[in-house]
Image (cartoon, rainbow, N blue to C red):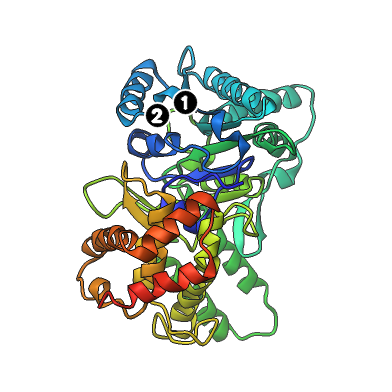
Amino acid sequence: RALFTGVQGIDFDVPIGRGQTMLFQGTDPEKDRKYLWPDLLASKPVMGSQKELFVNVVVCRTLDEAEELQSELKARGCWENCTIFVPISDDPASRMIAINAAAAFAEYFGEEGGEGVVLCDFEAMHDVWNVLAELAGQERAARGLLMDPKEEQWVQMQGTVIRESIGERRKFWFRLTNRAINEDGKGSMTLLGWLWEQDGSLQYRLRKAYEMKLEQIDEISRISDEIRAKLVAKVKADAAADGISFEGEPDETALKPNPNIPGVPNWEIEELKSISDGHIILRPPEADVWEWRVDPYRSLPRLGTDALHPALISADSPKLRLKMMQGNDRANILHDTIGAAETLDDKPGVELQFIELLLHQPANQLFSIDEEVARIVLASDAACTRLREVEGDLKRRDTLTGLAKELLQTDAGRQAMAEIKDLGFVTPPTLDLLNQEVATFR
């Protein structure tokens, strides 16, 4: 079953299924919690027998933050189905206990046949692990036990350099992430965990990647010094383009666990991505108003369409997403025109700049499933001049929203809304009528 959020960048590109663990990588902890979290807490089941019994649970860091969030949820009219957990203190152990308590609370609703959602900050798990790892290391040293040298090494996995995974840490994380469940004949518990990257950790990882390349060049036999120097110069030029300099020693601050430095190291986030059902990467907003900006090319949904709302599937949402991904690849690899015709099929081409309008929207401006379907139909039409003649992404985004409301007021739009309400999806004849109506938006 789909967890419909009203955030089209999620529902269209990285849909969340009930019973999944979805990892969010945000851009600003304070603003994300203040402006984006209320949107997720406003979600409610739109299909199925469980829609009458549901709860959205959130873990706040402080009582002041909880009271502010409660006021916002009351103003939106969704507080009745929300519960807030607050740790007794800001230390990592208390925050981790609060997360597990919230999960247990939501699990109860799942056992009773309802739908539970837990929204929380995973940073407490990282902080607690560092404390446990340090104590365990001291104990091993006291006993004269040697650490496995591989635990301190960096490895290259499918082109990504990360720190060697420690088995215990993965098990520690998995104890929480595997609590999300969708039981046959019962309800579900969905876990939405957020992390923010620690400053400097990505740069350190990138440096390690380039150092590995230099070591590999140094190990190549049977090449002249001149060719070796050219290869080294090329790697260093690529590193410089990524902002990595080999002048001086690297800053290893990111390697030393420090609870006073906010965020989680890049490589630990990469590890957590491997044991979650999917991850949503957010881009920093370009406007002064905080908004959702989903990065479609770095985010990863669960395979298949079981997490997609049936109405979005009926509007050819999976095909449109594939066109977007293929168009991006053609632009980056082949330097082809974005939106070349005959992408995937013989229909008119699509343009990335208009499909990507679906991926960002202001906070506290959620869309209904009807509006999301209408926006997809409009963004798919390469000849909709009323949208394409507008200059600037923000104006185009607002124009798309206005055109979607206009489309839903037509006979075809009202017929589509009736089918979504009664059937849960749009039938092919009605979708054809919607496309015919959009063809008049010239």
Amino acid under disc 2? Cys
Tell whether 33 sits left or right of 290: right
**Up/down of 101 relative to 262, above or below:** above
Quarter of the image containing the C terminus?
Answer: bottom left
**Up/down of 435 relative to 279, above or below:** below
**Mark 1 and mark 2 residues within 8 Å of each other at the beta carbon:** yes
Residue 142 sits in which quadrant? top right
Give the residue at the far top of this rendering. 88
Residue found 65% across the figure and 64% down from its top: 158
For disc 1, the marked residue is 81
Task: Count neighbours of disc 2 (C-alpha within 10 A) and say few if under 14, some if 14 to 19, many if 20 or more.
Answer: some
For disc 2, the marked residue is 78
Residue 403: percent from left, percent from top: 27, 63
How many numbered markers are drawn?
Answer: 2
Q: Secondary structure at mark 1?
A: helix
Q: Secondary structure at mark 2?
A: loop
Pick the front one: 241 or 47: 47
Residue 258: percent from left, percent from top: 49, 31
Pick the front one: 322 or 80: 80
**Up/down of 232 relative to 72, above or below:** below
Residue 31: percent from left, percent from top: 32, 37
Residue 12: percent from left, percent from top: 48, 58
Tell whether 243 sits left or right of 389: right
Amino acid under disc 1? Asn
Q: Is residue 174 visible?
A: yes
Residue found 29% across the figure and 27% down from its top: 75
**Up/down of 297 relative to 190, above or below:** below
